[in-house]
Amino acid sequence: MNTVLVSAFWPQKSQSLIFKLALVLVGSLLLAVSSKIQVPFWPVPMTMQTFVVLVIGMAFGPKLGLATVGLYLVEGAFGLPVFAGTPEKGLGLAYMFGPTGGYLAGFVVATLLMGRLAGRQWDRNPVTTAAAMAIGIAVIYALGATWLATFIGVEKAVQLGVAPFLLADALKILLATALMPLAWKAAKKFSRG
């Protein structure tokens, strides 16, 4: 039985090293693009990046998801402008260890967690998908706000690094809640026909 969405769509190819490398590369590009698609928001722009991070974790599983986010972080560490606000807000390790670095660490932990939850089939029905997404976003917030608090204090970290994004992330949870179970239904039809 296929435990993650990618292997459900492409059961034979999912074992190929070339296929896996292609997924990791495409996923890292999706992360970079999602960090650049910005909706004007105060105090910082909102991106679709948390949505993409969590869906990659669910769709790829823990190992491929982690490899994808890892490649994305390596690209950023080497100075490629893949992060939100780059190059204007800095590049490379300076950016990664700046105020938003904790959110990047949160991406790693949340991706691993989403992959494990997907392996337990949490991405196949709306209730558990919503719960998984909420947990993933909470992990990103927890690590991100904790790191941000070392720069601006706890109260401001919550005020500026969590509160402005709650409604937007609730909408991302709803989007994933609709998409992931539908993708599983499509995968079942795809594999049959």
Image (spheres, rainbow, N blue to C red):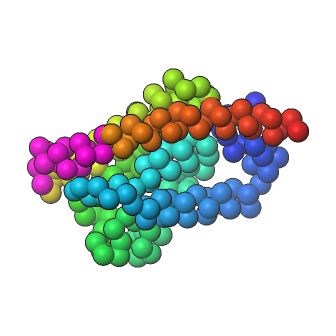
Residue located farthest toward the right when viewing the structure as drawn: 193
Q: Quadrant of residue 158?
A: top left
Check residue 66 for magenta coloring. no
Image-based side of 32 in relation to 140, left or right = right
What residue is rendered at 37% in x and 64% in y? 84
What residue is rendered at 62% in x and 32% in y? 181
> In front: 85, or 107?
85
Residue located farthest toward the top when viewing the structure as drawn: 127
Q: Quadrant of residue 118?
A: top right
x, y percent for residue 13: 79, 51
x, y percent for residue 41: 29, 55
Q: Main secondary structure of the magenta part?
A: helix
Quadrant containing the C terminus is top right
Asked whether the viewer can see residue 112, the reply is: no
Q: Magenta residues? A: 152-166
Quadrant containing the N terminus is top right
Image-based side of 175 in relation to 171, left or right = right
Residue 28 lies, with reference to residue 164, above or below; the image says below
x, y percent for residue 179: 59, 38
Q: Quadrant of residue 11?
A: top right
> In front: 31, or 179?
179
Residue 111 lies, with reference to residue 29, above or below; the image says above
What residue is rendered at 15% in x and 57% in y? 151
